[in-house]
Image (spheres, rainbow, N blue to C red):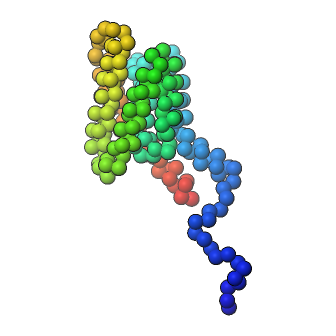
Amino acid sequence: MMPDPSMRAWEPEIQPRQTIWHRLDHGARRLLPTLFCALVIVVLSAPLPIPGIAELMPAIVLTTVFFWSFWRPTGMPSLAVFLLGLFMDLVGFTPLGVSALLLLLVHGVGLYARFGLMRLPFLLVWGVFSLVALAACLLQWGLACLFRLTVMDLPPALFEAFLCIGLYPPLSALFSSILNRLDDKEDA
């Protein structure tokens, strides 16, 4: 039997139309890292009786931005990183733009290094992140010294860097689990 010439052949590049719910679900999955960072900023900017809370918020946000910029850049777009940095500056009463600059630099390093580091073992990626976190915290300290026109104490900046470095493995494990679930959902 001959195929009907009036029927169109199956074309693999034609995709079925997504419903509004599919698009909302896809958008929510893409915004998950940004929403997580925004929630962390809101919760940790509250006056909670947690020691080191002032260093905890930037450490979590910096770690999150690096991880998602490295493994899933669509989940952490540059505009979202910039807005998160401005939001951190507003709630932290720091000079406007400092956190945005630092987060954008970390985001850029994550994007730039992603293809070279993706095949490396976790410890090497962690080592690269450690250098990036240390550089970001020292740059933040240097900018704070410049804005105040005085040399400030270095130990708080080092504490924040070591907190970032220490938070990377547990947050990386959590985010990897979330990333695997998101990938499974996209495949389904």
Whether residue 14 is visible to the viewer of this picture, yes or no, is yes
Whether residue 172 is visible to the viewer of this picture, yes or no, is no
In front: 144, or 58? 144
Residue at image coords 35%, 21%:
140
Q: How many marks?
A: 0
**Residue farthest to the front, as pictured:** 5
In front: 2, or 130? 2
Residue at image coords 32%, 37%:
129
**Placement of the N terminus among the 4 image quadrants:** bottom right
Residue at image coords 72%, 79%:
6
In front: 95, or 54? 95
Residue 182 position, x and y percent, is 52, 49
* Residue 168 versus residue 56 in the image, above or below: below
Residue 83 position, x and y percent, is 52, 29
**Residue farthest to the right, as pictured:** 6
Residue 101 position, x and y percent, is 42, 27
* Residue 136 versus residue 13 in the image, above or below: above
Specify whether 76 is left or right of 135.
right
**Placement of the C terminus among the 4 image quadrants:** bottom right
Quadrant in which residue 134 is drawn: top left
Residue at image coords 47%, 50%:
180
* Residue 167 versus residue 93 in the image, above or below: below
